[in-house]
Structures are given as C-alpha cells and as structure tokens.
Image (cartoon, helix red, strand yellow):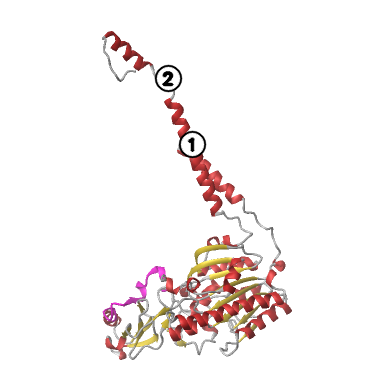
Amino acid sequence: MNLKAVLCVLAACFQSAISLKTGNGTETARDLPPLLLVSFDGFRADYLNKYSFPNLQKFYSDGVLIKQLTNVFTTKTFPNHYSLVTGLYAESHGMLASRMYDPRVKKIFTLQNDSDPFWWNEATPIWVSLQKWGYKSAGAMWPGTDLQIQNQTSSYFLKYDSKVSFKERLGNITKWLTEDDSVKFAALYWEEPDHTGHKYGPENTTEMARALKEVDDHVGLLMEQLNQTGLWERINVIITSDHGMVQCSQDRLIQLNKCVNPSSYVLVDLTPVTAILPLTEVSVLYKNLSNCNVHMKAYLKAAIPDRLHYRNNERIQPIILVADEGWTVVQQGNLKRLGDHGYDNSLPSMHPFLAAHGPAFRKDYWMNSINSVDLYPLMCHLLGIPELPNNGSFSAVHCVLVSEKCPDLGVIVGMVIGVLIVLSTITFLFRLMKNREPSTSRPFARLELQEDDDDDDPMLE
C-alpha cells in the first residue's frame, strides 16, 4: 500500500467525522435569541483550578468552557473590555490604558474623566452596530455603554456606581430583556474579584476564597433569575473577564526617580506599563531608563514588539516601560497595592477564562484557549449582524456552536487508530503471503551445480 492510498483513507476518515456534525438549520434575525455578556473583573483563569465554583461549574458543564483567553496588551480593564466588544487590539480601538494623553488635541483621559466621546470613537462597539440594524441593547455598568459612541449610547443603561449591588444590576438587565423583546444584546459588569485581588493580592487565599465565593453566588443568582423570568432556555449567556492578577511586593519596586531626573519627563501612565512623555532629549532619557532596572524593559515607540499590537496609535507615548511579572513601577515611595495587572499579555497570570451556555452552544464542550478578540466575531454571528473590520477570527471559535460542522476529536482519534490497525494488518498479511511464494529458479540452478560437485552444504535443506 503506497503513501497516496494511506492519505486517501485518512482523508476519508476525517471527512466522515466532520459529517457527523450537522447544523440546526437557519434562523431569521428576529428569531435569534438574545445574548447576555457578563464580566467579572480580574477573574484569573487558574482560579478555576484552585477554588470551588459549584454554580459556575453547573453553568459550563451544560455548556462551554474555554480554559483561558489570551487577552490584549495592556492587560487593563478599559482596553480589554473594549477589545471584547470591538474585536480590536488596543492600538486599533484607541482605548490604550487607564490614563492616556493625546498629543494632537492635548487631551488627558483618566478613569475619573472618561466620558468624552473623543476617546471612544475610534471603534464601534457591538451594541452600536446592533442598534444600527434596528435592534436595542442594554448595559449595566459595562464600560462605554452609557456614553455617546458614534452618537449613540446603549438603548438602556446604568451609569457606573460601585455602590449598586450585583442583584440590582442583574434585575435591571432581566427587566429590559423581558419587557422589550427588541433587546438582543445586554452587557453586565461586576468589580470582583479585581477589587479584592488589588487589595490583598491573589496569593491571600483566605480573602480570595471569600471574594470568589461571592462571585460564584452571583452566577447562581444569574441562573436563578434567568429561570424565573423564563429566559434561561432561550438566551445565550457568555461569562468572562478582562484580565488576571499577580502578587506584588515591597521587595519588587522600581523607582524611576532614582534613575532619571523627574524634570526630564511627564508620567502619563504608571505601572506595570509606564507611558513616558520626554521633556528632554529622547535618546538620553531612553538610555537612562534602559539601564534603570533589570526587571524593567524600556522601548522606544517604534521598537515595541509586533506581538503586543501596541505601536500604531498617536496616544502611545514615545517611551514605554514594561515591568517584569510581579514588579511595580513608581516614581518614588512605597508599594500602593498587593496585587496588580497590566503586564505582558503572554503571561498566564494575566489570562481570563470564558464560559458559555444557551441554545446556540454545545453541551459539555471545552477548549484550551482562544484570543479574546475572537469573541467579537462570535457574538456578531450569534446576533446575525455583519462584523466590522476586526482582529478576531470566527473560525478559531466557531466549534463552540451546535450549528457548526466541526470534527469530533474523539471520533477522529478512534478512526485514525482503527485505520492504522487495519493498515498494519494488511501490511502483515502482505508480507506473510510474499514469504510463502515458491522460490525462484536461481536457487534450483545453484542446487544442480552443487550436486554435480558433490558438495554437502548444510544450509541447503
């Protein structure tokens, strides 16, 4: 059996496995179930392995679990929440950090001064796209839903107020979904376990266990509310987060003012990704910062690695400093918090997770990883609206859907093993039959010659 035949057999097996998965037909846009996106800020992916989550486990055991998401750089709250709903890297959607400076218009962005549409209008979030197609959306304190982006807020929204309980936020979401059937997308945000992670650090297992139990209780309340309102069986729900968290220490401080004169720069954003606006010669300042601490890397804007997708935007400052995992950058003084995020997005400690449940999703299905920007094309598909240009890939995540034709890995592995067994058997039988064929004429000729010579050769028996 030649190689071409083997490949044909394997290809047939893969095709058979794929054909086992069939779609559920098509739906009109109006028939599509609503979609609820929930974010628990700072929920690090490996918390799932370290703590008990009976409600969350119940949620994804009847749905989908993606063990970790590779999020976008910087691994901060605003950049990543905007990436989830636009499918864009930070350099493309313009929401780069918690503090920004735009040199062209000389404006400053902070978490306390975030409502100017100027900062948000470089991208179109999914709720704005949805509303342009004639549907409505709802937002309970999800970043941006209460702001005029592309001249639109979310159809229904709650302005951010940390004093408003999760139960109240959820109650508003379910009210809007049940009372207005044109609401097809809703987004819900909660601050924990981020707040506790910052205050105590993720290695404080007592405090983190308390905060994560509260989060799991909220998941239980979510399922209960959706059941009571009749939404549970007809709504698609995605639970995820924006970033992880890492333990910091007073012993891992990088003090900039010990390396450079504070009058030589303006600090735009601080730790662990620090944005520097030089006030003196850029090359000299860059050299001094490069030699400041072995646990901090200095980049000129043009030399920021491609993989970070953090270079092509006017709001990125001429010098960017990136601290090593667990290290904190300060101008001077002491450590302000025991846990932090914002570090390199390749670090597992920065990765969140994703779980999904609903009529569109497979049951008891898991994946190891996707990119967080892949969520946007998935949500567009669920809502039946076209994607705007984005950095995500629907093909990377489409197998979570029951309507998609996807190979079943278990079936494929079983078929491949079966094919290999069959091929091995055929090969063995082929060789066995070959060995039983009559000998050729040449040995007989040799035998006749030896007999003439009267030669007793013990090998010729």
The structure residue drawn at horizontal position 49% and vertical position 35%, both measured from the top left corner, is 426
What residue is drawn where x is 49% and y is 41%?
421
Residue 84 position, x and y percent, is 54, 73
Residue type of the residue flagged with mark 2? Pro
Dot 1: within a 10 Å radius of its alpha carbon, few (fewer than 14), some, or many (20 or more) residues? few
Q: Residue at x 68, y 79 (%)?
A: 174
For label 1, the residue is 425
**Residue underneath mark 2:** 438
- In this picture, residue 103 sits left or right of residue 211: left
Query: Is 302 placed left or right of 214 in the picture?
Result: left
**Extreme residue toward the top, this view:** 452
Q: Is residue 94 visible?
A: no
Q: In this picture, is 104 found above or below 47? A: below
Q: Which residues are magenta?
A: 289-310
The amino acid type, in three-letter code, at marker 1 is Thr
Q: Quadrant of the C terminus?
A: top left
Query: Magenta stretch containing residue 394, yes or no?
Result: no
**Can residue 406 be seen in the rendering of this structure?**
yes
